[in-house]
Image (cartoon, grey):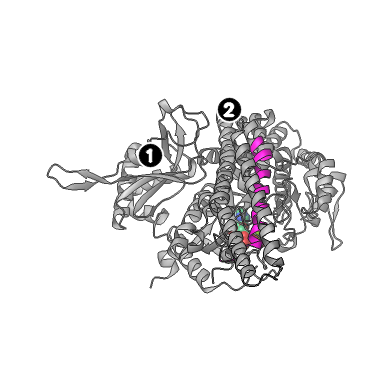
Amino acid sequence: MKTVPEYFGSMVFDDRVMKARLPEGVYRSLRRTMDQGERLDLSVANAVAEAMKDWAVERGATHFTHWFQPMTGVTAEKHDSFISPAPDGRVILEFSGKELIRGEPDASSFPSGGLRATFEARGYTAWDPTSYAFIKDRTLCIPTAFCSYGGEALDKKTPLLRSMEALNRQAMRVLRLLGDTETTCVRTSVGPEQEYFLIDRALYEKRKDLIYTGRTLFGARPPKGQELDDHYFGAIKPRVAAYMAELNEELWKLGILAKTEHNEVAPAQHELAPIYTATNIATDHNQLTMEIMQKVAAKHGLVCLLHEKPFDGVNGSGKHNNWSMATDTGVNLLSPGEKPFENTRFLLFLSAVIQAVDDYQDLLRLSVATAGNDHRLGANEAPPAVVSIFLGDELTAVLQAIERGEDYTAAAGAVMKLGVHALPRFPKDSTDRNRTSPFAFTGNKFEFRMLGSSNSIACANMMLNSAVAESLRQYADRLEGAADAENEVRQILRDVITAHKRILFNGNGYDAAWLEEAARRGLSNLPTTPDCMPRLLDEKNVEMLTRHKVFSPAELHSRCDIMLENYCKSVEIEAVTMSDMARKEILPAVEAFAAATAEAAGKKKALAPELTLGYETGLVRRLSGLTDRMAEAADALDAAMAALPQGDIIARSEAVRDEILPRMADLRSAADQAELATSQEHWPFPTYGDLLFSVR
Ligand code: ADP
Ligand code: MG
């Protein structure tokens, strides 16, 4: 059996393979493209394509595909085989540089938000040489960006790459102004912690809600949920352990650094975290991880649920986005360091993040907004919909001292002149104790915790990178115009703390009092997707995102439309599914149970006329009351669906939130009560207890 180091990355056309298989000149030219964004020559592309094909064919691949991330949120691929006919009737296997660099899938059915009329359906995929090609299902997958004929981004990768460039540009300006002559680029890194549920496939197949919507739309609370906290970090059950072992193996073959795994808070809930890597690669890897998680589950008779809220009453699933900025020389710019210069640099980059999060709270909020994630944010299991930053007491005290223009006195009693003496070191663990904060400093990185488990991390990171780039741009402008740079840095730090301290909050984010306090501080509270998504088009946001060339105004309009449409469609599918399940499954089942009870009562009465039949009469009355309520609620839901406004997507999304969601809740409430009153034998599909405790 092969050891992990022997098979790690065996399905990836990575640096090792490139070095071994490409002529030296080609390798060096490709590296320059990867590292410095230099244009790729067609002759180089041809040589790379040839080597990729040979390598892939040796590993059993027959097809290639441009692998991209359209606005659907999942990855897309269109497979082409390598075969090409030879004159004598045989086939040869071919793959050209042109095919590697550019593809032209018929893209008319991907959401474009009006960017691409169907009559000019052409969309292009363009190779992203910074993310390695890999083999999946006997297909060579080439990570690509996806854009329209006119060059507008139709995917999540393009703006992410642009935002990384923007951050690099501005961070480099600041570093140069601080006297750094060595660094040649600054990259952001991400380690996303992925939560998920595993349930038994046979039970899943019996529930239309899970099949169509990824979450349960009905289900009374089981006698036991997560009250005992016995699942969190509990021993991993054999079936789950076998799943995780195969999952790790598949991920490792793809060069994905799957590192930690454990049981989460809810029964049947688990988490996987990889070791952090460059943001665009982390994004590709997270998309692949979600796909492989589902694929491997199928092989184990399981289903992996990535929905943010598969079950009411137990915790939902999120994704923690651990984010930092580092230089190509290996310096983490969010690491406090020990020398005065390092402190200054650290404090300036820290301030850039604080200002960015405050100035663009709305962008961060909307970057994680989906119908699914609306169930989590603010539900006392995930951070609230209000964005704030946790820094920990020590760092907060340092910043307060800067604001007051005082020296900082560390707990140990030593006085430190800021920017002159070393800052206290912030041990990683001393800061990582607040689990309720949406945006927490954890020693040398920030952890953005609002992401939903099914979100692509591209969205959050493109906003974060852009917003931080904007803070850094302002600092670079100020430093360029300043006579005394050191003094100007101190002034910038003071200004930032004074203007943005409202975003700092070290307390309990779940506390209702915090929401009031946040309102007093003027922080934005945008609980739902229809509340926050239109903010994408606010002038200040359009101004910033276009200034840094992350989006064009047309792209922003299209994204806002796509995301709101997606919200509406998700909820509408849920509404139709609920109505269908209520009418075709639940009502007939409860009716049958009531009829059986009445029939049994009739038989008992015939046998013994003196019986009072209190149980049966009460039960039939109760069931009958509940079926009436359910039928009324289902009718009201259908009527609300029929009355949804057409045309204006913002109005429709608000109606979906205000008219559809409450009626779904009414229907569910009646059905869940009926479930508690109906015999197990009559209930038409597996219950919460069955689903949550099925995997051993
Ligand atoms: P916890 O559950 O305590 O938050 P984990 O170990 O589960 O911690 O996850 C931490 C994540 O943060 C991992 O993916 C890790 O690789 C990542 N990480 C660590 N250091 C950095 C860094 N400098 N930049 C980005 N991510 C980081
Ligand atoms: Mg974490």
> Label 1's element?
helix
Please state if 101 lies on the left or on the right of 264 as rendered: left
Amino acid on which disc 1 is placed = Ile
Residue 311 location in percent, x, y? 62, 57
- Does residue 489 belong to the magenta stretch? no
Indicate the quadrant containing the N terminus: top left, top right, bottom left or bottom right: bottom left
What numbered label is drawn on residue 101? 1
Indicate the quadrant containing the C terminus: top left, top right, bottom left or bottom right: bottom right
Q: Mark 2 points at which residue?
A: 647
Q: Which residue is drawn at 76% across and 53% down?
A: 391
Badge 2 density bin: few <14, some 14–19, many ≥20, Cα 10 Å? few
Span shown in magenta:
654-681
In primary-sequence order, the first of circles 1 and 2 is 1
Please state if 352 lies on the left or on the right of 411 as rendered: left
> Label 2's element?
loop
- Does residue 670 belong to the magenta stretch? yes
